[in-house]
Structure formats: structure tokens, C-alpha cells
Image (tube, rainbow, N blue to C red):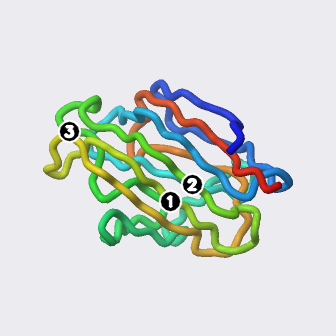
Amino acid sequence: LEFISSSDASGSAALAFTGFDASKYDSYEFSISNILPATDNVFFMARASVDAGSNYLAASDSYNCIGVDGISVGDTTAIRQGYYKLGNSASTDGGFSGRFAINSPQLNLVTWMEFNGTYGGSNGVVGLSVGAGSGRTKAATVVDAVQFLMSSGNIASGTITMYGKVNS
């Protein structure tokens, strides 16, 4: 893995990473540390771009997704963490830490992405939970940027660090 960039959230609508370089990297891994939502009952999500971050795939048929324990997360506008939403009685009660990977985005095929990590959630979940989610773009396309965001509201705080898996 080779460090590419890092971004800190502070009331951020989204964190975007556009440092994709197919000549150097076959896939990418993101270290996600202490991402907290500004509002309760939201999902932490990722969206892919095919135009270097000018736009992100957000149509209602952009992705196929699945969540923890094989439960369909039902969101076709983004890849999202786990099955349960973040936050409890206050936004600082439930956040997300873990990893996100994008595999072979430089190929003109469907692009596979996955989350895993721990989080504090709502939906009756108290304390820590283990969450995972994965998905892919429905269309074959070259992905060259990714954006992290909440399903509603801002990212209150946290850090995301991007690494590339060197291809030679």
C-alpha cells in the first residue's frame, strides 16, 4: 500500500478523493477513523465517479448492494455501511471506523466496493456493532474518484486516508 492522501471532516457535506492513477495502482483502500454524523439515524455511504469527481453516480439504479449478514440494504444510490443506521440519542453516540476498498476501478467492468468496521448505531442497537456492506456499479465503467457522505446531513468529524495498491 502506498499513501495517497488524507482528509479530515469538520461539518463536511462530503469528503472526495480523486487521486486515482491506473498507471500506478490496481485498487484502493481507505482507512476510516472515527467518522461521526452531524445528525442521527443516517448511513455512512460512498459514491463512485466516472468523470474525475465532477459528478457522482447517484441515480436510483447505479449500484447493487448488500449489508451485514446477507441482508439487502436496498440502497441503489450508494454503497453504504452495514445494516443499521448511525447515531443514538446524540450524534456522538454512534459513528463508524473501518475500511473501504475499491477493486480494479480502472477496468471497464462493473466496479466492486466494500465496507467493514465497527460502529455505534440506532435501530435499537446499543453500544458497538460490527458492520459490513458491499456492492458494485450496475454498469460497466471506469471509476476514477470516490465521495464519502452521510445519507442525510453532514459528516461532523473524522478522518479518511486513501492508499493505493501498487501494481508493480
Front disc: 2 or 3:
2
Q: Quadrant of the N terminus?
A: top right
Q: Is residue 164 left or right of residue 117?
A: right
Residue 139 position, x and y percent, is 64, 75
Q: Amino acid at mark 3?
A: Asn
Q: Residue at x 50, y 29 (%)?
A: 9
Disc 2 crowd rating (10 Å Cα; few below 14, some 14-19, many 20+) is some
Closer to the N terminus: mark 3 or mark 1?
3
Question: From this viewpoint, which residue is outermost toward the right?
Answer: 23
Identify the mark at residue 88; answer none if there is no mark.
3
Front disc: 3 or 1:
1
Closer to the N terminus: mark 2 or mark 3?
3
Residue 12 position, x and y percent, is 50, 31
- The residue singled out by tag 1 in the image is 114
Question: From this viewpoint, which residue is outermost toward the top?
Answer: 10
Disc 3 crowd rating (10 Å Cα; few below 14, some 14-19, many 20+) is many
Q: Is residue 96 left or right of residue 17?
A: left
Residue 70 position, x and y percent, is 33, 72
Disc 1 crowd rating (10 Å Cα; few below 14, some 14-19, many 20+) is many
Q: Quadrant of the C terminus?
A: bottom right
Closer to the N terminus: mark 1 or mark 2?
2
Q: Amino acid at mark 1?
A: Glu
Residue 4 position, x and y percent, is 71, 37
Identify the mark at residue 101; answer none if there is no mark.
2
Q: Residue at x 74, y 58 (%)?
A: 26
26 is higher (above) or lower (below) than 147: below
At mark 2, the secondary structure is strand
